[in-house]
Image (cartoon, grey):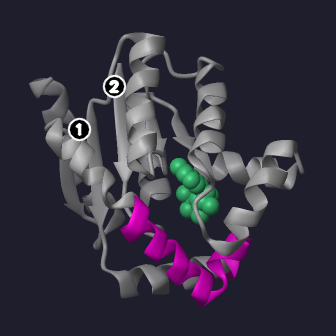
Amino acid sequence: MLNIVLFGPPGSGKGTQAKFLEEKYQTPQISTGDLFRYNLKNDTDLGKQAREYMDKGSLVPDEITTNMLIDELDKGKGPKGYIFDGYPRTTSQAEALDKILEDKFEDEVTVTVALVVEDEILVQRLLERGKTSGRADDVDEDIIRHRITEYYTKTAEVAKHYKAQGKWVEIDGVGEIDEITQKLIEAINDAMINE
Ligand code: AMP
């Protein structure tokens, strides 16, 4: 399997790049943010549980998020692997993902590619996206800044987990979209060769 973790702060371009990588490697994207938004829209029990956190720009608790991910993997859409977009976002989620991949597929994360973008560019990108995305958490600058703070306080530490496994590659997330895609593909291909 090819299991790619696409990592980076909100607005770093994970979702955009995941679409290109899906096509290139024929591995479906799993975006926990998209899954939560689907549940919000359909007003499911899961959506009701997630709403209070998402509205504030806070992370949804690990257990709720990981159970949702397991349900998605159980659908079996990615026999060749997956692109994880927005998961893991805490060290406990990273540990859970290792265990889930091992238990379900006797496999592991191939590589984590982290998009690096400075904060003020993130804020500008998200405000711009908010004009058309229909996402409440993209419109309010305070909520955007809280999402970025959540990233630094809870998510950035996930880097240690993957660095310790030799599976961490950083990529400049500012520039032309197709140039960034190329850099991601090079990093992923290198990781596949060295696996
Ligand atoms: P995203 O679309 O990835 O920016 O996620 C939107 C929101 O969904 C986040 O601000 C969180 O409230 C929630 N969310 C998405 N993925 C996770 C995750 N892995 N852990 C906790 N909360 C998440």
Identify which residue is drawn at 32% across, 59% down.
Answer: 178
Q: How many marks?
A: 2
- Looking at this view, name the residue that lies furthest to the right: 43
Residue 89 horizontal/vertical position (percent): 45, 52
Q: Main secondary structure of the magenta part?
A: helix
Q: Is residue 186 visible?
A: no
| SS type, badge 2 | strand
Label 1 to label 2, Cα distance in Å? 9 Å
- Looking at this view, name the residue that lies furthest to the left: 194
Residue 91 shown left or right of residue 136 in the figure: left
Identify which residue is drawn at 15% across, 23% down.
Answer: 195
Q: Quadrant of the N terminus?
A: top left
Looking at the rendering, the stretch of residues picked out in magenta corresponds to 131-154
* Quadrant housing residue 5: top left
Residue 45 horizontal/vertical position (percent): 86, 44
For ligand 1, give the image quadrant: bottom right
Residue 55 horizontal/vertical position (percent): 72, 70
Labels 1 and 2 touching (C-beta < 8 A)? yes
Residue that carries the numbered disc 2 in the rendered image: 2
Q: Is residue 55 visible?
A: yes
Q: Is residue 144 magenta?
A: yes
Which comes before the other along the chain, label 1 or label 2?
2
Amino acid at circle 1: Ile
Residue that carries the numbered disc 1 in the rendered image: 188
Amino acid at circle 2: Leu
| SS type, badge 1 | helix
